[in-house]
């Protein structure tokens, strides 16, 4: 999504609030002349956990640090900071991908647990493509939650994008069927399908998703081209279980990380990227419709671990 | 996904072999496992740090080292300490001396305020009160429609209009509640970031204007380390009296509960356990403590069993089992009781290590549909066949399968399971003299 580059300014302001996050703590741990001992490793590990990276990733990094210290490549505590930044960047760089419209129509399926921000993100993506001059269609396949359809319709009016809908409580597969028919008949560029939030542990609801996917595939072989899990930054270790279960149910193509304008950094994506090899396709940094950004590893690392 | 703390600790203590003597180092190692378990459950690292110190003092004083099952001993200490930190059970929202009692919900976007508001309204209505809801989220598209729809579902009036100012909505709601004699009044406010000063000002303005008796912070159980920051900021900016923990029906360990409780000192009043409006429960610290440690939620299971199993029926069942007159009709009643307890995967999830037992979602679903199928099969039998299953021969099996829309294999499987159950009960009967009194939830004890 090249159109997003111009919004770099907003990203900076969104992320700047979180800048102070590890800055002070890290500075107090990584004092240049402090001896590198077990106490330091323990404090460092705590800090990494505080960023929701998880105990496993934190332990991994500390082991790597121990190695480097043993080999003599790191001799002072403050050298651990660039080492950690490199460690993060190595994982995240291949994970930075953008949403590309290779197919026509490109079908994007939005997935996630309740309250992660699927509807808002659907609208933001729609608005972004529309601003690029593409023709966009939204499908309100969350027929379960009270007023979810109205929420998407309100967004649709605001950004001037048509929303395909049925009555509340109707079969989401039927909505998707209609939406695909409309998308094909009008030859739009993008169809974005907003699904109902569901906890990844609800087997029947996950099966329903698999069915939705089959309905899409049958009508348009090769679709959905993108199946994105929407994950909010405050999510802790459970985020990994979410990504895993959704991935197993429908086969994800990427992650959208939302609510990065708060104090949470979304550290859990590191584990998702590392273990599930899923790319991060966009991030949300605010409530406005244009608060959607491409994922830039360097900035993300800056927010987690400031340079100094 | 995660190993339970007891399994981990077992590993630590197993490695010590039979040398018997534990040292300070061993305890350190055990506590490191405790630490990792808590961190994986999303308990804030600062909270964990203080916690470990307390556990250490307590564990050392308790002769953990000399106990026969040191791993269990440590888990016990940790568990007890967690319960204490999570606070007393069942915080009640006291009624105000001059109604309406005003309950205000605040929290981050997507934490579940609107759904919780409707659940609370239903909960109060069930207690014989006459609640009223105020929709003060004028920002999120269709938030007010959402509350109106939910209000209709729970049959509670909803006031508020997107064209009004949130403060006005709340004030008018309070006036209306007083005039119509409705209480409590539940205010659903807009979701906002805890660093959004303009929005926090609005919350403060509502608080000053309407003077709620209970300000509840709604926290998503899946929240990670940031839960501490969120709770601190909301508490400092608006002030909170209690906490509602939502989305506990997933597999999140819910360590955020401990973090939030610790930094605010406020009790957790309610727990949200599903999308439907009746899925709200009072908070039980021992359950959440067990869950944080991956010990399962046996208490909830016991309660569920007690709620669904009819005591009289159960006694009758045991008598029949003992007299060997347990028929297929009785078997069907048992199956139905199991089904009433809820989806199998939920029941399993409540058991210690139950999540590990889950043989993969597909298998469980097969079990679940077996329950339904068996019910259908028994329904297709004649009374004689139900009472004397031994008469069910090949051609009867074919008829039953056709009648119930199943296969002969299904019928065979049912009969086999029924026979197994009877055999098991016979064996149990043989052992009765030697067995200690078996106390099963909802079932009278087997020795009678």
Image: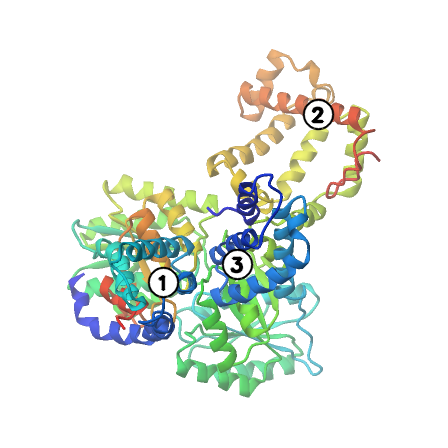
Q: Do the residues labelled 1 and 2 touch (CB within 8 Å)?
A: no
Q: Do the residues labelled 2 and 3 touch (CB within 8 Å)?
A: no
Q: Which of marks 1 and 2 is in front?
A: 1
Quadrant for the C terminus of chain B in the image: top right
Q: Which secondary structure lies at badge 3?
A: loop
Q: Mark 2 points at which residue?
A: B424
Q: Do labels 3 and 1 share a chain?
A: no
Q: Locate residue A205, reporting x and y percent.
A: 45, 47
Residue placed most toward the observer, A27 or B406? A27
The answer to whether B374 appears left or right of A151 in the picture is: right
Residue A39 seen from this side: yes
The answer to whether A234 appears left or right of B390 in the picture is: left
Residue placed most toward the observer, B79 or B101? B79
Residue B165 seen from this side: no
Q: In which quarter of the image is residue A41?
A: bottom left
Q: Which chain carries label 3?
A: B
The answer to whether A229 appears left or right of A132 in the picture is: right
Crowding at mark 3 (Cα within 10 Å: few <14, some 14-19, many 20+): many
Q: Are marks 2 and 3 on the same chain?
A: yes
Q: Locate residue B1, reporting x and y percent.
A: 46, 46
Residue placed most toward the observer, B129 or B212? B212
Residue shown at 33% from the left, 61% from the top: A257
Residue shown at 20% from the left, 62% from the top: A129
Q: How far apart are marks 1 and 2 (CA)?
A: 52 Å
Q: Which secondary structure lies at badge 2?
A: helix
Q: Mark 1 lies on which chain?
A: A
Q: Which secondary structure lies at badge 1?
A: loop
Q: Locate residue B27, reporting x and y percent.
A: 57, 53
Q: Name the residue under label 3.
A: B254
């Amino acid at each position: 999504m090249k159109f997003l580059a111009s919004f770099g300014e907003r990203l900076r302001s969104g992320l700047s609030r979180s800048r102070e996050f590890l800055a002070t703590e890290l500075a107090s741990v990584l004092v240049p002349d402090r001896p590198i001992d077990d106490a330091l490793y323990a404090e460092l590990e705590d800090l990494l956990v505080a960023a929701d990276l998880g105990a496993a990733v934190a332990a991994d990094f500390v082991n790597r640090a121990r190695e480097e210290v043993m080999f003599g490549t790191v001799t002072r505590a403050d050298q651990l900071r660039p080492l950690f930044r490199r460690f993060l960047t190595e994982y995240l760089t291949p994970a930075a991908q953008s949403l590309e419209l290779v197919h026509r129509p490109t079908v994007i399926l939005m997935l996630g647990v309740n309250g992660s921000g699927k509807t808002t993100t659907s609208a933001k993506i729609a608005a972004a493509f529309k601003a690029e001059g593409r023709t966009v269609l939204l499908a309100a396949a969350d027929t379960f939650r009270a007023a979810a359809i109205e929420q998407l319709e309100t967004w649709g009016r605001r950004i001037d994008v048509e929303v395909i809908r049925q009555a509340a409580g109707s079969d989401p597969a039927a909505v998707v069927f209609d939406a695909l028919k409309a998308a094909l008949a009008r030859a739009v560029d993008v169809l974005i399908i907003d699904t109902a939030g569901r906890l990844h542990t609800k087997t029947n609801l996950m099966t329903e998703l698999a069915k939705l996917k089959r309905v899409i595939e049958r009508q348009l072989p090769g679709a959905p081209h993108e199946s994105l899990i929407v994950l909010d930054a405050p999510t802790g270790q459970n985020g990994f279980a979410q990504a895993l279960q959704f991935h197993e149910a429908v086969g994800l193509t990427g992650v959208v990380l939302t609510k990065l304008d708060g104090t949470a950094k979304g550290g859990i994506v590191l584990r998702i990227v590392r273990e599930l090899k899923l790319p991060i396709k966009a991030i949300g940094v605010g409530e406005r419709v244009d608060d959607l950004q491409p994922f830039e590893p360097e900035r993300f690392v800056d927010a987690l671990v400031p340079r100094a | 996904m995660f190993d339970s703390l007891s399994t981990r600790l077992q590993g630590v203590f197993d490695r010590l072999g039979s040398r018997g003597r534990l040292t300070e180092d061993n305890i350190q190692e055990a506590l490191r496992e405790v630490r990792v378990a808590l961190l994986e459950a999303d308990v804030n690292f600062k909270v964990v740090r203080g916690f470990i110190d307390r556990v250490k003092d307590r564990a050392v004083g308790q002769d953990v080292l000399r106990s026969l099952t040191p791993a269990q001993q440590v888990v016990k200490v940790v568990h007890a300490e967690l319960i204490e930190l999570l606070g007393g059970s069942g915080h009640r929202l006291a009624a105000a001396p001059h109604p309406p009692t005003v309950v205000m919900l605040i929290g981050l976007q997507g934490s579940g305020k609107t759904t919780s508001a409707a659940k609370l309204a239903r909960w109060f209505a069930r207690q014989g009160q006459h609640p009223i809801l105020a929709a003060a989220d004028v920002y999120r598209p269709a938030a007010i429609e959402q509350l109106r729809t939910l209000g209709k579902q729970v049959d509670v009036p909803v006031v508020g209009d997107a064209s009004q100012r949130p403060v006005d909505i709340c004030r008018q709601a309070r006036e209306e509640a007083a005039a119509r004699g409705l209480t409590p009044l539940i205010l659903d406010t807009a979701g906002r970031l805890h660093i959004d000063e303009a929005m926090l000002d609005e919350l403060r303005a509502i608080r000053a204007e309407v003077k709620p008796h209970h300000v509840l912070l709604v926290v998503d159980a899946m929240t990670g380390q940031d839960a501490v920051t969120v709770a601190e900021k909301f508490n400092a900016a608006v002030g909170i009296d209690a906490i509602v923990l939502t989305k506990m029906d997933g597999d999140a360990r819910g360590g955020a509960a401990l973090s939030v409780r610790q930094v605010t000192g406020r009790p957790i009043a309610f727990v949200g356990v599903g999308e439907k409006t009746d899925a709200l429960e009072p908070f039980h610290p021992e359950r959440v403590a067990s869950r944080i440690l991956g010990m399962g939620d046996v208490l909830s299971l016991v309660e569920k069993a007690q709620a669904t199993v009819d005591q009289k029926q159960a006694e009758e069942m045991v008598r029949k089992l003992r007299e060997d007159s347990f028929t297929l009709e009785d078997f069907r009643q048992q199956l139905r009781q199991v089904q009433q307890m809820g989806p199998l995967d939920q029941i399993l999830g409540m058991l210690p290590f139950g999540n590990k037992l889950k043989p993969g979602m597909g298998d469980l679903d097969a079990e679940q549909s077996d329950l339904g199928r068996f019910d259908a099969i028994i329904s297709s039998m004649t009374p004689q066949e139900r009472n004397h299953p031994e008469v069910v021969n090949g051609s009867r099996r074919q008829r039953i399968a056709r009648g119930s829309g199943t296969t002969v294999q299904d019928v065979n499987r049912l009969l086999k399971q029924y026979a197994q159950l009877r055999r098991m009960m016979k064996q149990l009967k043989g052992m009765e003299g030697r067995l200690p009194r078996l106390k099963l939830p909802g079932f009278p004890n087997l020795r009678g």
